[in-house]
Image (cartoon, helix red, strand yellow):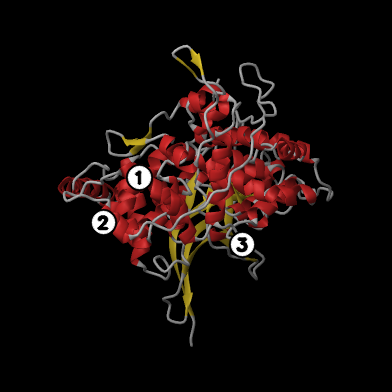
Amino acid sequence: PSFCSLSQVLFEQDGVFMHGDAERSGEQDGFISGSLRLMDKVTSARCHGDSSSVVEWKCNERPSRPLESQLSCETEWDMVNAVYFRKKSSTPADGGVRWSFSVMDLMSVKVRKEGWMYLIFILKNDSTIPALHFHHGGGEAFLDCLRRHVLLSDRPNSALSQSFENLLDDTTFGLIQKFRKDPYTTTLGGFSKVTNYLFDAFRGPDAEPQERPPDEVADMLTEAIPGLDINQQEEPGFEVITRVDLGERPEVQRSEPVTQEEWEASVDSEGRIRDPQHLKNRIFRGGLCHSLRREVWKFLLGFYPWSSTQEARRVLHRSKTDEYFRMKLQWKSVSEEQEKRNSRLRDYRSLIEKDVNRTDRTNSFYEGEGNPGLILLHDVLMTYCMYDFDLGYVQGMSDLLSPILYVMENEVDAFWCFTSFMDEMHKNFEEQMQGMKTQLIQLGTLLRLLDRTFWNYLESQDSGYLYFCFRWLLIRFKRELTFLDVLRLWEVMWTGLPCQNFHLLMCCAILDSEKQKIMDERYGFNEILKHVNELAMKLHVEEILCQAEALCLQLKNCKDLPSSIAEILGFSCEASAAVEVDDGKERDSPEPFSPSQVLQSAPSFSPSRNGHIRNGAPDLYKLAYIS
């Protein structure tokens, strides 16, 4: 077949100067005048192939004008790209200077000013293009044009940053800086190259191949999430947790899933749930048959009140459908011209489009090009930006929506169930990461009580900050379990049983099953990260649920349970007291809790004024940990 190449010029400007040495930026003789172009190139057999935008600069040998140097300032522009191309450069036969590269090969752009703007392009292969100086203006116009083809972000804590694979190539503490700016992308991008990645990130390009001490690496990681200090025993005002006799850990058995017959028997003639607590107990114990999930998840997530009739739910659904499509129309009706003046919406859309194209693509509901499931995933996430524009979209939220949309197969139902889930998960994605900080602190407190020997080992390996659990907590084990196991796990957790923060006990259960190998093999800082990462898709949800519930029973039966642990898990004061006093008479300690008693006494969840689930005492745990 015959091949052809077409080019469309998107931006062109003469009088753009090149400088090959940043240290000589004030010397006029170092500048070479040229023309800068941003072009859209198409190359294929019929000229209908894939296009790629190319930045090209060519020397035109115009004399440079004297310019005054001023103090410089710098802004970092981080870029999200999924496709990697090799840099293309050429030298024309006439001896003139020319270079070009695909914008998809671009990792970042540094913007500096010395009376005029100049740009420094850094490519993904760590090479740097000589600075381009816009002596006669036009730099902002070029960046505006570039934004139409790649995603640029200049916000310091934005979740819109480069992928984890690119972060691994950063030098001079680049990874720590990126983790501080964007722990979500860093963590979700996949710890697939986790072996030695931290130590490699701390080496400069010409550094000797020697590792920094692990304690120095851990100290720098401490700065990644400001305010995070898991080992708080020595700080005034915090409870000191000493060794406690936890007693025996009971055996726990799981049950079969709730069947269609059980569900039908639990509903009265008007559609009300006869005994919501009993039904939640059964769901916690065995989960649901898949055919029931589409209906029952709406109750678990607070979209439908447990006490509602079938007619009330029909009226509510009609109202919520209207509300959803009103919000959807808001972003659908934004014109291209409007979007050019709305950088936040433009950024949200760009990141959503990128994440949708890589979320659960092996699942039949999302696989293939032009799949309707992908369109629904995109539309629900965009509409959520209208629902909560302050949060908008952060990487990881597509992972939380995907299983819900898969079950509902309807964008309206999926949206309202997703908003309820996000009410619970919202703090995980906020810029200050308060939710993640609190959970990591609480997890450390639980581990310290459950197994002081293992905790001390983690501390000795500078792993006491539990960063290897970050992804588990951020998206509730979505990347650690098979898709069907995620469905089972989430519906169990949505019951709110058997205690508050049950997902933290699941983390403890996983680490409890791996601690012997970690200590016997004497894993260090890197090896622990690598080992935990490699557990993904090897975990069995039913086993983890049994172990986590057994931990819950063990702690609830403990006579001397520290109050901070009781607050984390939502246990009542009576449950952790060694002796009860009533009517002035002292009584013996209560009998150990059975699984059914734990389920009955677990904290309840009630719908908020918006119909979304809320924990009855959501801020109780803060008393012991937030100064």
What residue sits 71% from the left and 35% below the top? Answer: 452
What residue sits right under mark 1 in the picture? Answer: 278
Q: Quadrant of the C terminus?
A: top right
What is the quadrant of residue 579 in the picture? top right
Q: Residues within 10 Å of mark 2 (few under 14, many from 20)?
A: few
What residue sits right under mark 2 in the picture? Answer: 264
What residue sits 59% from the left and 53% below the top? Answer: 107
| Gap in angstroms between the C-alphas marked 3 and 1 | 74 Å
Query: In the shown orientation, is residue 201 left or right of residue 408?
Result: right
**Picture coordinates of residue 199 (x, y %)?**
75, 47
- Pointer 3 and pointer 1: residues touching (CB < 8 Å)? no
What's the residue type where badge 3 is placed?
Answer: Arg
Sequence-wise first label, 3 or 2: 3
What's the residue type where badge 1 is placed?
Answer: His
Nearer the camera: disc 3 or disc 2? 2
Q: Residues within 10 Å of mark 3 (few under 14, many from 20)?
A: some
